[in-house]
Image (cartoon, grey):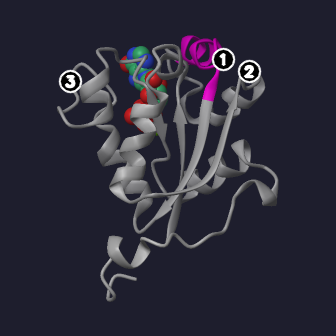
Amino acid sequence: MEKSLILFKPDAVQRGLVGRILARFEAKGLQIVGLKLRRFPVALMRKHYDAHKERPFFDNLVEFMTSGPVLALAVQGKNAIEVCRTLMGATNAAKADPGTIRGDFGLSFSNNLVHGSDGPESAERELALFFPDADELVEWTPVAEPWVYSSEER
Ligand code: IDP
Ligand code: MG
C-alpha cells in the first residue's frame, strides 16, 4: 500500500467543491488516512513547491496557495500516487480530460483545484510537511477492502 499527499487548493474550497472532489477519491476506493483544513503559512507552501522555485509562476503560485483555506488529504491504496494523478487529470485544467477532477471542474492552468504527489519521494516529503506528527495519519482497515481489491492484489 502506498500513500499520497493531496491538496484541495483554495479555488476548490472557495467554489464549494470540497465534498464533490473528496467523493471521487472515496468512490475510487482510496482510503482516507489524514485530513485537515488550514490556511497554511507561506513558508510551508514555499517548501512544498521548492522544485518550482526558479519557475516564473512560483510567486503567484505561493500567493494563490496561501490566499485561503486549503484541505490537506492523505490517501492510501495500491499505487495510490499514480491512481490519484490519473483521477486529477492534466495540469492545465482547460485541457484535462473530461471525467478527471480538473477536466470536469476547471478551466485554468494555475487554479486547477488539486495537488497530488508525483512520486514516492515527493509523497514522503510532502506528507511529512503537511502531517508532521505521527498521530496525524490514522492506521485503519476499511471493511470494504476485500471488495475493492482481489485476494491476489491484496
Ligand atoms: P501538477 O500540479 O500537475 O503536478 P506542476 O508542474 O507540478 O503541476 O506545477 C505545480 C502547480 O503550479 C500546478 O498545479 C499549477 O497550479 C501551477 N502551474 C504549473 N505550470 C504553470 C504555468 O505554466 N502557469 C501557471 N501556473 C502553473
Ligand atoms: Mg507537481
Q: What element carries label 1?
A: loop
Residue 39 is labelled as none
Q: Distance between the residues labelled 2 and 3?
A: 29 Å
The type of residue carrying mark 1 is: Thr
Q: Is mark 3 on a helix, strand or loop?
A: loop
Q: Is residue 118 magenta?
A: no
Few, some or many residues within 10 Å of mark 1 (<14, 14–19, 20+): many
Q: How far apart are marks 2 and 1 (CA)?
A: 6 Å
Residue positioned 45% across, 65% down in the render:
77
The quarter holding residue 91 reads: top left
Q: Determine whether label 2 and label 1 are within 8 Å by CB.
A: yes
> Measured from the top left, where is residue 78 in percent x and y?
41, 69
Mark 3 sits near ligand 1, with its Cβ under 8 Å away = no
User: Start and end of the magenta stretch?
Assistant: 58-70
Which residue, given by chain and number where applicable, does mark 2 sit on?
42
Instruction: Say which of 11 and 46 sits in front.
Output: 11
> Measured from the top left, where is residue 66 in percent x and y?
66, 17
- Disc nearest the viewer among 2 and 1: 1
Which residue, given by chain and number where applicable, does mark 1 sit on?
66
> Measured from the top left, where is residue 106 in percent x and y?
31, 19
Which residue, given by chain and number where applicable, does mark 3 sit on?
95
Instruction: Say which of 116 and 28 sits in front.
Output: 28
Q: Earlier in the sequence, mark 2 or mark 1?
A: 2
> Measured from the top left, where is residue 54 in percent x and y?
56, 23
Q: What element carries label 2?
A: helix
Residue positioned 34% across, 54% down in the render:
28
